[in-house]
Every structure is written in C-alpha cells, then in structure tokens.
Image: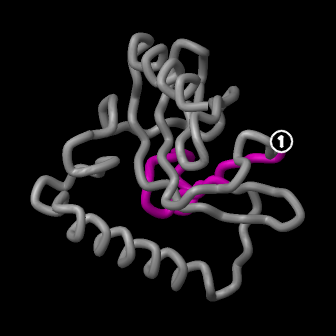
Amino acid sequence: MKRNNSGSRPLAIAMSAAISLGLLGASGCAATGTRTKSASAPLPGKPACLWLRNIQGWDVLDSSTMIVYAPLAKDAYLVKLFEPVPDLSFHDRVGFDDGDHDGQICSLGDDVIVRGSFEQHVPITAVRALTPDQVKQLKAAAKAHA
C-alpha cells in the first residue's frame, strides 16, 4: 500500500506506542510483556508475523479482532487491533499497511486500513499464529456472542 509521507506518521506511531505501553502497565501486563484481553485471559496462539504478500483473506470475529489467512486457509493468524472499528465486518475495503516496510505484518508500526466514507488506519497490537482447533474455538465463541 502507498503511504502518506507527511511528518505526522512518525508522531502517530510514537503516540500509539506510548498509549499502548501505558495500557499495558495499567492492566498489569507490563511485568510479563504479554498483551491480554484482560489480566486473566491471554490471547490464544503464539506471537508471530505474517508476510503481507501472502494474505489471502480474513474473518472478522468482533470490532477489534480478525483471523487472517496467509498463505493458505490452514495458516491462520489472530490480528488484534488497538481500538474497535464500528461495523468492521461490513467494510469490504480492508487492507494492511506494513509500517516498517519489511514485508511483514507483526504489530507495533503495522496497521489495518479500513476504507469507507473516510480512510482509517488502526494500529495492530498483536499477531498470533493459531492452530486449527484455536480457529474453531474462536469462531464458535464469536458466533455465540453475535
């Protein structure tokens, strides 16, 4: 994806990182360095990165959580967003921005781009490799809460 080369991007990344660190400390996760939904519920899967060029599709679990498939449907990754995106599942124009230009989507510095009436860049806070069983469990839980 093309990126806006204005000077505001580095400031936005720095602000996002500072806010993320503040939230980690406030939630009690700073000591372990693990992002969690809450202090007692860690995200499933193992920390990972995925190649941007391999993304084949995704499923939206909720307004801040996606399962991304890359390169095959059996290769699934949980992608957690910094903030909820209202009606994320109804946006048909979603993309990914590789902030450090290394070809991978990992977390800090990488964004999900949602295009609607305006373009919204939402920082990614976690990417986790999932097993097929974890994918089934996450989809079942999302369906139960829908």
Q: Residue furthest bottom?
A: 7
Q: Quadrant of residue 8?
A: bottom right
**Which residues are drawn in magenta?**
93-112
* Residue occupying the point 74% across, 55% down: 114
Disc 1: which residue:
92
Query: Can see residue 142?
Result: yes
* Residue occupying the point 29% across, 71% down: 21
Q: Is 38 placed left or right of 32 in the picture?
A: right
Total marks shown come to 1
* Rendered location of residue 105, percent (x, y): 52, 46
The amino acid type of the residue labelled 1 equals: Asp
Picture quarter with the N terminus: bottom right
* Rendered location of residue 46, percent (x, y): 30, 32
The answer to which of 48 and 22 lies nearer the viewer is 22
Magenta region includes residue 14: no
Picture quarter with the C terminus: top right
* Residue occupying the point 19% across, 58% down: 29
* Rendered location of residue 97, percent (x, y): 64, 55
- Label 1 crowd bin: few (<14), some (14–19), many (20+), radius 10 Å: few
Q: Residue furthest left?
A: 31
